[in-house]
């Protein structure tokens, strides 16, 4: 770690708070200063804590503004400046605060606290101690703005791509956004030369992972550093799963076109060492991985937007207050994406059918096969003559789940698996369109099917289904190394 942390000494904080308040000058009853409280610190011509100020006259005519908000309600002068700066520095070096809150964020929390203390100061030392402890506790519970970058494997893009809450950047972005700021920050550190050399050396493989990835995911959220990586991985995986949903119609196979983060995809090194005699041995290594990238070019993105409801599904992932149907869409995106990523066919069936259940069957329905098939047929087919065939096929495809789960079936025909993947995507896309049209829950589909069966209007008058694909030529490729690692075989 580059920071040195210390435990908080509450008596020291109390002393600093008191020093600041003893040096304050209040601007009372000024109608211009009724906006959100801010703090101005002046001493020996210096100020801290706010942007540049406008012209200054007498104390009662301070005209500092930021974005139209006028400043301030409290002035702190002279010795209060030093106490304020020391208070900020102390909090910045405190374990549990400075290790995840920036100096600016700490300052933004301290300023209103001083405003409150100025209006209602504690009555005695015990009260001061209690108020200060409560303030520190509130800081430790704050969620700070976090921006996390993660290297993404096998996703090749030509321009920034926003999917849900994630922005994917093409290769090269990492130099200015990641490497340069970190290296610049290191230049300001005063650690011993040996320690700095170790830090720089440890960053080399770290930077290499970003430079070697074809794209980089950026995630912004409020959180704590201790959980930021897990939140970033989870959020990014949601967006990656949406891209995975389209693999069947884009490429026709997921065996070689696999995208993911470092924890669920990547190269695998298979080490081995053979001894022939006590002094004779040979090191055998093998490197395997997937070399056919998921490429999102302009023509691909246009297809996904026009035929695959890509923008609507992306917005669903970004939605904070989701409807029941939007939650079902999020669930389906996750499971269909997983089903297009895992390699075992039986696991694929389990994940894909879970996605279908989320979209087609209300949670309170016990017998799932018949309503799932019926709902899918009405959703995907406007023709009454064509629905029975679709319903039969959907029941057959969904039936594979019971065979996998309850009978231990492992041999899944390629054609059946491909058909299941396509229908999962088609249902996902059509339900996304319905969400835009005003449906808010899966029961809206159930109600629409019931009305249609009793002579009402059909669920779908016309359907522009996403093409089965693949819209791009099917490619196969794999690379591996043999022997001592100096020989490589590539097939494409």
Image: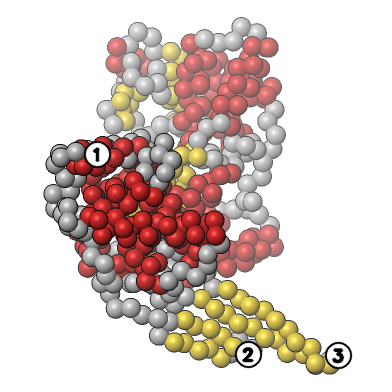
Tell me if residue 270 can be seen.
yes
* Crowding at mark 1 (Cα within 10 Å: few <14, some 14-19, many 20+): some
Which residue: 26% across, 67% down? 468
Residue matched to label 2: 483
Residue matched to label 1: 450
* SS for callout 2: loop
Q: How many marks?
A: 3
Q: Is residue 380 left or right of residue 122?
A: left
Distance between mark 2 and mark 1 Cα atoms? 64 Å
Q: In the image, residue 168 lies at what x, y percent?
A: 37, 58
Mark 2 vs mark 1: which is more N-terminal?
Answer: 1
Which residue: 73% across, 90% down? 282
Identify the residue at the far right of this view.
278
Residue matched to label 3: 278
Distance between mark 2 and mark 3 Cα atoms? 21 Å
| Quadrant including the C terminus | bottom left
Q: Is residue 166 left or right of residue 106?
A: left
Q: Is residue 75 above or below residue 411?
A: above
**How is the protein colored in the picture?**
secondary structure
């Amino acid at each position: 770690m580059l920071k040195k942390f210390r435990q908080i000494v509450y008596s020291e904080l109390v002393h600093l708070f008191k020093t600041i308040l003893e040096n304050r000058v209040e601007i009372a009853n000024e109608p211009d200063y009724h906006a959100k409280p801010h703090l101005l610190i002046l001493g020996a011509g210096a100020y801290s804590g706010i942007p540049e100020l406008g012209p200054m006259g007498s104390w009662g005519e301070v005209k500092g503004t930021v974005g139209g908000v006028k400043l301030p309600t409290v002035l702190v002068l002279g010795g209060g400046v030093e106490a304020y700066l020391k208070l900020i520095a102390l909090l910045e070096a405190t374990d549990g605060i400075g290790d995840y809150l920036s100096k600016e964020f700490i300052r933004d929390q301290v300023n209103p606290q001083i405003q409150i203390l100025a209006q209602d100061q504690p009555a005695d030392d015990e009260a001061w101690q209690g108020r200060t402890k409560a303030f520190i506790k509130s800081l430790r519970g704050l969620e700070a703005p976090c921006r996390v970058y993660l290297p993404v494997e096998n996703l090749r893009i030509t321009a920034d791509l926003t999917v849900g809450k994630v922005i994917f950047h093409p290769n090269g972005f990492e130099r200015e956004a990641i490497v340069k700021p970190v290296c610049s920050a290191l230049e300001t550190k005063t650690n011993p030369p040996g320690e700095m050399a170790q830090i720089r050396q440890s960053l080399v493989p770290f930077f290499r992972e970003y430079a070697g990835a074809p794209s980089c995911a950026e995630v912004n959220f409020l959180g704590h550093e201790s959980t930021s990586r897990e939140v970033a991985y989870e959020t990014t995986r949601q967006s990656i799963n949406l891209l995975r949903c389209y693999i069947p119609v884009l490429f026709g196979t997921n065996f070689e076109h696999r995208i993911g983060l470092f924890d669920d995809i990547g190269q695998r090194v298979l080490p081995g060492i053979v001894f022939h005699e006590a002094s004779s041995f040979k090191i055998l290594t093998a490197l395997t991985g997937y070399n056919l990238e998921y490429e999102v070019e302009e023509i691909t993105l246009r297809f996904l937007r026009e035929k695959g409801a890509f923008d609507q599904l992306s917005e669903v992932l970004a939605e904070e207050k989701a409807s029941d149907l939007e939650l079902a869409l999020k669930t389906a995106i996750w499971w269909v994406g997983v089903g297009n990523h895992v390699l075992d066919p039986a696991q694929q069936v389990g994940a894909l059918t879970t996605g279908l259940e989320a979209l087609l069957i209300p949670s309170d329905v016990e017998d799932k096969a018949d309503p799932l098939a019926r709902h899918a047929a009405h959703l995907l087919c406007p023709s009454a003559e064509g629905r029975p065939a679709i319903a039969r096929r959907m029941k057959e495809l969904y039936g594979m789940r019971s065979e996998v789960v309850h009978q231990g079936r492992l041999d899944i025909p390629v054609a059946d698996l491909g058909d299941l993947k396509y229908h999962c995507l088609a249902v996902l896309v059509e339900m996304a369109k319905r969400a835009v049209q005003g449906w808010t829950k899966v029961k809206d589909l159930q109600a629409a099917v019931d009305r249609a069966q009793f002579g009402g209007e059909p669920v779908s008058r016309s359907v522009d289904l996403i093409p089965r694909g693949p819209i791009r030529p099917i490619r196969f490729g794999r690379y591996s190394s043999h022997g001592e690692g100096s020989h490589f075989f590539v097939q494409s």
